[in-house]
Amino acid sequence: MIVWLYSLVSVFIISLISLIGISTFSLKEKELKKILLLLVSFSAGGLFGNAFFHLIPKAAESGFEIYISVYILLGIIFSFFIEKFLQWRHCHIPTSEDHPHSFAYMNLFGDAVHNLLDGLIIGGSYLTSTQLGVATTLAILFHEIPQEIGDFGVLLYGGFTRFRALLFNFSTAATAILGAIIALSCSSFIQDFIPFIIPFAAGNFIYIAGSDLIPELRKEEPSLLKSLLQITVFVFGAFILLSLVLWE
């Protein structure tokens, strides 16, 4: 019951992040962009931290076998497939004339698939240990904040009203709850599946952080001070995940 409670509370909190678009109503685009770049840096550090400090070491507890590398690579390939063929985009900069987006409904479908996978990963992580479940939830949470703001902008650009965009964004985010329920309901199967899903999740996180988030930070040429601030926030994001290992 504790595993069910932790898992469902975690995915529910992550689903609520989809409503963060409300907070952007009073912000000007220029102000929002500055905040988002720091959130993207923090998110990238958190995803890398979870992959390298938690997921991969957990997968390699009995020794680092070649299949672990294969599963990590499969996770990277899967993320690439979703992004390439389903037009799934984790863009974290709001839409504008200089930064246009399209395929709003396809974006919703891609996010629903991604969030379902997040729920499976969180449920599987809690089945392994509470500490791993918390670490995975934090890493996904860090990533969801800038992602959901970006997705909210995509829907507005696609012609959605603000209320409708929030409603649809929350609906796709809620598939994470379904993913966790599936993982917990099929716990005997998921337990056998964990040696695959943990390094597979690491591959997903590495792809998102390296192929999606960091390039967002390189789209403009910030000042030396801004660059140092982004790097500092990146390291801080990774350090938080490392601190969970040290605390354990």
Image: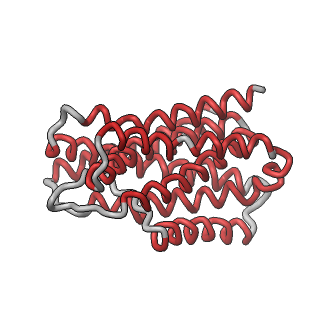
In terms of depth relative to the viewer, which is nearer, 153 or 195? 153
Outermost residue to the right: 188
Quadrant containing the C terminus is: top right
Can residue 41 be seen here?
no
Q: Quadrant of residue 98?
A: bottom left
Q: Is residue 20 above or below residue 100?
A: above
Give 203 or 145, whichever is nearer the viewer.
145
32 left or right, relative to 164: left
Name the residue rendered at 33%, 37% in the picture.
163
Instruction: Decide if residue 210 is in sight here.
Output: yes
> Residue shown at 75%/53% (left/top)?
194
Residue 198, position as x, y percentages in the image: 68, 54
Q: Does residue 37 appear to the left or right of 88 in the view shown?
A: left
Check the image and tell me how it is coloured.
secondary structure
The residue shown at (56%, 32%) is: 12
Quarter assignment of residue 246: top right
